[in-house]
Image (spheres, rainbow, N blue to C red):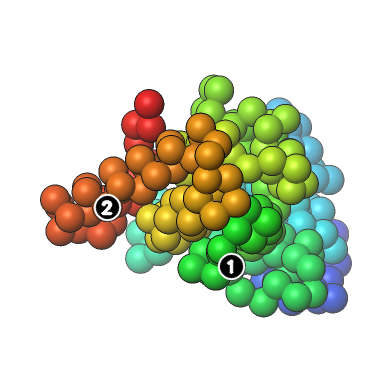
């Protein structure tokens, strides 16, 4: 038997909730941090796993995912909810609580976008609302060549917009945005207002029309949100 764990730090309730969830999974699996670290050859280490369930800070998602995977048992698979999905939701809430500016109390509304500055700010707020995934994390999640970390960093800093609607959809999908059609419409509206003669604006017009057509043909609003889109 190892020494008892220190109590969860409850300074940030969302971080504490994630820590409580992780500790409950570990207890259910009957594991120690030593055994968990041994199973991963020390990556993540025992100290990293302990820190992830301390509540003192928000661990990296890779650490949380490894923690959950290590605690999965046949009993875990029988629960009517997905532990990994639940962990992801708690992790996003913890990141949001730790990193979101004081004024951001809900997800941004793309219908409030009227210009390029509005659109850039809404993208940045959506990124924060998703828990501020790093440019490197977003690049890995999007796949090769879709969201280069350098480009993503400049979008997050407010220096540029996504290069085209397809990249915007990738960015927004990773940031858990809802109603992608409204977001592409917002981009079109902003660019038509502030950059009406920019050659890139036509790609947003075409993408918006394409998504509207797909929605009308399918009678299924969800299909308009599919990330695959040809703007050539």
Image location (x, y in percent) of residue 28: 56, 62
User: Can you say which quadrant of the picture contains the C terminus?
Assistant: top left
Residue, x 58% and y 67% (percent of image)?
A: 108
Secondary structure under the numbered disc 1 in the rendered image: loop
Q: Seen in the image, is 87 located left or right of residue 215?
A: right
Q: Seen in the image, is 55 located left or right of residue 91?
A: right
Residue, x 79% and y 74% (percent of image)?
A: 102
State the residue position of label 1.
108
Q: Residue 29's image quarter?
A: bottom right
Residue at the farthest top position: 144
Instruction: Determine the CA span between mark 2 and mark 1.
Output: 22 Å
Q: Is residue 68 above or below residue 109?
A: above
Q: Earlier in the sequence, mark 2 or mark 1?
A: 1
User: Can you say which quadrant of the picture contains the N terminus?
Assistant: bottom right
Observer-nearest residue: 108 or 35?
108
Q: Is residue 104 visible?
A: yes
Image location (x, y in percent) of residue 228: 35, 36
Q: Is label 2 or label 1 in front?
A: 2
Q: Is residue 27 visible?
A: no
Pointer 2 local density, CA inside 10 Å: few below 14, some 14–19, many at least 20: some
State the residue position of label 2.
212
Pointer 1 local density, CA inside 10 Å: few below 14, some 14–19, many at least 20: some
Image location (x, y in percent) of residue 170: 50, 40
Q: Seen in the image, is 211 located left or right of residue 71?
A: left
């Amino acid at each position: 038997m190892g020494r008892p764990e220190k109590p969860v730090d409850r300074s940030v309730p969302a971080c504490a909730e994630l820590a409580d969830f992780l500790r409950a999974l570990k207890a259910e699996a009957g594991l120690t941090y030593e055994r968990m670290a041994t199973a991963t050859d020390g990556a993540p280490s025992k100290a990293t796993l302990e820190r992830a369930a301390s509540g003192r800070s928000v661990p990296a998602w890779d650490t949380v995912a490894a923690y959950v995977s290590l605690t999965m048992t046949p009993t875990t698979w029988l629960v009517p909810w997905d532990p990994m999905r639940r962990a992801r939701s708690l992790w996003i809430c913890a990141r949001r609580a730790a990193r979101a500016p004081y004024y951001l109390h809900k997800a941004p509304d793309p219908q409030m976008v009227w210009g390029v500055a509005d659109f850039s700010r809404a993208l940045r707020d959506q990124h924060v609302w998703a828990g501020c995934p790093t440019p490197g994390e977003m690049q890995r999640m999007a796949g090769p060549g879709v969201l280069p970390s350098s480009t993503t960093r400049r979008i997050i800093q407010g220096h540029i917009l996504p290069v085209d609607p397809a990249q915007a959809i990738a960015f927004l999908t990773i940031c858990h945005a809802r109603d992608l059609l409204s977001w592409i419409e917002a981009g079109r509206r902003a660019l038509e207002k502030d950059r009406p003669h920019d050659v890139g604006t036509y790609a947003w017009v075409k993408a918006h029309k394409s998504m509207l057509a797909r929605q009308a043909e399918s009678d299924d609003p969800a299909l308009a949100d599919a990330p695959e889109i040809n703007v050539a």
